[in-house]
Amino acid sequence: MASAAEQDVVLPPKVTNSGSAPTAPHIAVLLNGYQMDIRKTVPQVYQFELTFVGERTVQVQGQPQVKKQQFERGPRNDESKETRRRLIWGLFQQLLDQNRDFFGDNKKTYTYDCATLLYSINDLGMKQNMKREFVLNVDRNALEDRAKAYIRNTERIVAYLLRTETVNLSNAVQAYLRGDRSVVQFLELLSSQRMFEKAQHYAFGNRLYDQESALQLQGVPQILKSGMQKNVRFVGETLQNAMPILQLDPKKSAFFPGSDLLTFVCEFLGVNHPDVVMQSMPKYFDQMNKQIKGLVLQTTHLPENQITFANAGLTNRPANEITFQREGQTISVVQHYQSQYHVNLRFPRLPCVIQKAGPKESFYPMELVKIVQGQRVPIDKQTPKLTEQMIKQCQVMPFAMQEQITIQRDAGMLQNMNPYFQAHNVRIDPNLSKTEASMLFPPAIQYNPDRVEPTQSGAIEWKLIGGGVQNRRFTVPVEWPKLWAVVIVQNCVQMDQCQRFCEQLVNTAQRRGIGNAMLPQRVDHYSETSIDYVSEKFQFYALHRCMFVLFFADGKERAHPGDIHHVMKYCEQKYDVLTQHVGPKMTAKGVGGGGGGAMIFENIMMKTNLKMGGSNYNLVTPDVFKRAIRNNQDVFADVWMGGKRMFFGIGMSHAPPLTLYERQAGKAPAIPTVVGMAYTTGREMLRLRGTYWFQQARTTIMKAEQMRPLVDAVKNALYIYETANNDQFPDHLIVFRGGASEGEFKKVSLWEGGAFELACKEVAHERKGKFNIPAVTIIVCQRQSNYRIVPERINSRGKATEQNCQPGTVVDKGVMNAALTEFLLIPHRALQGTAQPLRCSVVHEFRPPQGPSARLPQMKLEEIEYITYALAYSHGICAMSTAVPGVLYSADELAKRGRNNWKMHTAEGSSAQVFELPPPGQGQEDAFQALDTQRSVYFSEVSEQLYPKIATKFWA
């Protein structure tokens, strides 16, 4: 929930495109949204809090006591949440049926989130803060089986109704623009009611999946289910014409199949019989345990009332070796099932799954449980093979994307015939929203000495080789290190291959203008890949001032806790020795000759030149742009990306949520959120510096307690800029912030914008008048928003590159936020599927009260659009534009590098500090604050230990 200070933040006013920058001809595009007409809807809806509480009698110290359970609360796993949702919906329907004199006959006038939030067209005769109770006469046979099982021991169910607020629908736009999302929340819930009623979807917030869909994948037991993510936004050119749109983004997600556990495990491991698993248990145990730990399972051996539980893991002994006391005798799990249930286990040498209930543990043989349906596969359980299959299946071409949107709309009955829409007099446009898109010109690429211009259509090809290209040299080539070494890890390449590879690499360096390129002075062979072994080698390199290590090793596709790639990158940071990884396949292709082989050396050299502090090319104004403005000025390089402007990128890598086992155990490893920050140090957009640090897990906004590392990082960046620019500081800081949601815009402005301002004030104080506080602009870039845009006219037979909107397509009219400076941009070429546009929103515009920057006007929309697009060409290695500006791409890479270095530093987290979670009850808030303080101190210490000190773009 936003604080009062956050709610009071005023975001920068909307700036529209003035048309001052030329573009290519406009095109008509479709947005994946349908306009909602609420002009004739009910003037308001009344908000209530509705909770269902179950009661049962328990014995406490020999005395009966009533134990209450609020059904909206419980475990956070998918199965439990979905079961509770369906239970509460069923109880809600019975509540309405049994109290028609109070609630009336029309159920469609109610909108319920199946937790606590209820909206009604009528006030039900209740004033604000008035309460009512209803005792239900529950018809259990009317509930689904999973819901009946959930309340098996419940003796009485009471519904508690509390009148809270009134949501004004007649003033919806103004409320939304003030940051009040109550109307949006209501409309999003309203659009879900029909799907809740039909019970044909699994619902996880605004993501809903057809429970009957099940796409079988090749080589993996998991299945894909089709569905959608939906949300409501108010869009428009002005506040006066703003209207809500219902956006639908077709989705596919991996689910665990509702099969017996043993069948799933065998398919997952790729074996044809459980006997194979029993015979090779040490080989398979860790894989099995990681995959099924936390899964909700159900027994199959009981005559009735099967037990459903969250698996706490596998036993470290097989069923025939696990014993316990029963009636004074020691018996095994195998004997227990024989005598108690007349079940002879077929696979007694397999481990059991564990059910935990406080300190008590129960063991169930793997062959006697099944996986409960409706559970998504979390990221940490997605194997490379599954990920590959998911990516392939989710690559939907634009023409098919439109069809899938229609299918999902119809499946959810998100149409005018929806009885809930009809009851509230809400209308839905049957056609996708249409608007006009501009086409931006890409930058020209300046090498030394030649320059690559885009074609009239906006296409540009700037590879170093191919197509008759000769003698392109880097704009800022480095001097080759005087001392460098080659490492061959575990004989992955032959010595003669290594020799030829290095010779061709040196030749490539010389062609690109790199001075003093020479063969390595040392070749080492690593027999081990442990951190201790590699660290000892790097200590030697650092001692003898070796500046660069080229290592030949198996690729990252074989990632494991001892992955040499991550070990080498960890040692790179620890000992300040730059590294470059080359895999055996790349080596063989490189020395094998041919165009593809030559490109390998070019790519490595582009990476190496950036790593060592050089720049490969510059971004300059294309001739087509100059002709359009009738001016030969280099607007791109001298004005938009020059003129003492400094660009920042901020990205984050978040920790996974706590597992059910960790929550039950009351312990949690200190897995941090990693913040990556990259920044320019002058006019060359490819010459970046960067850093990363660690903070509280899953912290998406750097608030007061996380501001200090950001403030210090910005100050350090400003001093580095000063050194690189003859004691001159920037006049304008432009920040590309990745990942923040719309609900966090004000928080980003208040806290992170405040951190940049504080850093500037501290530098001004430390420089005592030699520093003029710069302007600060923060642009939030959402790559994973559920916006989609496709051309209105599509050749259904065309390739992905032909069906998609082309790079440089920008939408800033009609379908964007009516109050914010905002646009959609497709900066990259979609080679497969449908391009995902970058949603960019200006959330912070600061001007100091005095000094040169005080007079800077708010940035023009077309200027921001062109800068964002041009920086997508600043990756520096790949001769293609990227999906985000290069400085933000680098920030995300730094966050990943920080995450991997943290894993190496803590042995994959096993040596990370573990903190006790405070028990529930009085004083828990103070205990959590103390815990946060402990974690902050720990993360600060680790940040200092892993601070990257290499003064170049070492992550290239």
Image: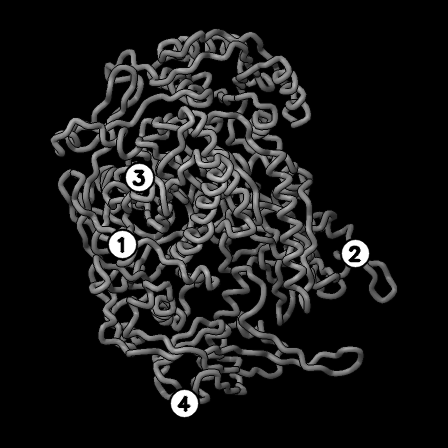
Of the pair 316 and 834, the residue shown nearer to us: 834
The residue that appears at 59% across and 79% down in the rendered structure is: 54
Q: Residues within 10 Å of mark 2 (few under 14, many from 20)?
A: some
Where 354 sits versus 942, above or below?
Answer: below
Gap in angstroms between the C-alphas marked 2 and 1: 71 Å
Question: In which image quadrant can residue 101 be found?
Answer: bottom left
Quadrant of the snapshot with the C terminus: top left
Gap in angstroms between the C-alphas marked 3 and 4: 54 Å
- For discs 2 and 4, the disc positioned in front in the rendered view: 4
Q: Earlier in the sequence, mark 2 or mark 1?
A: 1
Q: Earlier in the sequence, mark 2 or mark 3?
A: 2
* Residue type indicated by callout 2: Ser
Can you tell which mark lies on residue 14? 1
- For discs 2 and 3, the disc positioned in front in the rendered view: 3
Q: Secondary structure at mark 2?
A: strand
Can you tell which mark lies on residue 125? 4
Question: In which image quadrant can residue 850 be found?
Answer: top left
Q: Residues within 10 Å of mark 1 (few under 14, many from 20)?
A: some
**Residue 715 placement (x, y as % from top left):** 49, 37
Gap in angstroms between the C-alphas marked 2 and 3: 66 Å
Gap in angstroms between the C-alphas marked 2 and 4: 63 Å
In the image, taking residue 478 as reference, residue 351 lies left or right, namely right
